[in-house]
Amino acid sequence: MTVSVQAEDFDVAAEIAALSAGRNEVGAVATFLGLVRDVSGGSNVAAMTLEHYPGMTEKSLGEIVEQACSRWSLYGVRVIHRFGRLEPGDRIVFVGVAGAHRGEAFAACEFIMDYLKTRAPFWKLEETPEGACWVDARDSDDSAAARWEQGSR
Amino acid sequence: MTVKILYFASLKEALGCTEESFVLPSGVSTVGELRSFLADRGEKWKALGEGRNVRAARNQRMAAPADPVLPGDEIAFFPPVTGG
């Protein structure tokens, strides 16, 4: 399966191995791993809860992967995003891309993360000493996604 | 002439509402018109008002204000996403 939205943790090494298992045409696997940080905007974060929109989440991630596959010649893509309550150090998101060479693998991995940040319906609620606080979207995420639309990369 | 409306995250909390079945009134035929109509329902519904940073989806796809709303649709309103 290409896309998984799940509460459970995942095995990074197993996911990376699966991207090239039995495929000797794969010359490069680029990955991104997102983790929960213990600080956000100057506040300590004890935990966060990720809410999502079941149904739309899977659909939007699938479309992002499809777009990446139409832009670059890729041999495999894997996206895992967790939801529910997570603590600092916990894994949140994994993106793995297999290609012939590093160029398309790096680019597609970054593209998927940039689009995921602005299009996949997830919301973070952080637990801080000041109380629970919804994370605000950042303009820098919008501009990171927008640069892929200008054909500059 | 009914649509299902979903609310998420901080917007859900502000409205105190997760989901509702809503009969489309006459004059409401787009996502933007639906949002305006809902925002006029009372004090707390101003969270959906103009100037608030609210995004919408129609049938689980990101939607623009001009997109149509048809009976049977699933419409969702939520703040800008913050996953990853």
Image: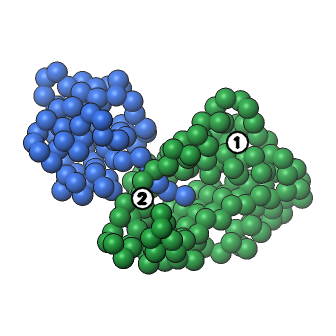
* Relative image position of residue A75 (x, y in whole percent): 78, 50
Locate residue A51 relative to residue A113 in the image: left or right: left
Residue at coordinates 40% horizontally, 34% vertically from top-left? B63
Quadrant position of residue A31? bottom right
Left or right: B15 as drawn, with respect to A26 = left
The local crowd at label 1, few if under 14, some if 14 to 19, many if 20 or more residues have their Cα within 10 Å, is: some
Question: Between A134 and A39, which is closer to the camera in this rendering?
Answer: A39
**Relative to residue B82, is residue A4 drawn left or right?**
right
Q: Residue at x 78, y 51 (%)?
A: A105
What subunit carries mark 2? A
Q: Is residue A24 visible?
A: yes
- Is residue A19 depicted above or below B76 in this figure? below
Query: In terms of depth relative to the viewer, which is nearer, A119 or B75?
Result: A119
Chain B shade in the render: blue
Q: Quadrant of residue B73?
A: top left
Q: Amino acid at mark 1?
A: Cys
**In the rendering, at what x and y percent does residue A29 appear?**
80, 59
Q: Secondary structure at mark 2?
A: loop
**Location of the N terminus of chain B (image quadrant):** top left
Disc 2 designates what residue? A135
Does residue B18 appear anywhere in the picture?
no
Q: Which residue is mark 1?
A: A69
Mark 2 residue type: Val
Which hue is chain A drawn in? green
| On-image quarter of the C terminus of chain B | bottom right
Element type where label 1 sits in the image? helix
Depth order, front residue of A67/B10: B10
The earlier-in-sequence mark between 2 and 1 is 1
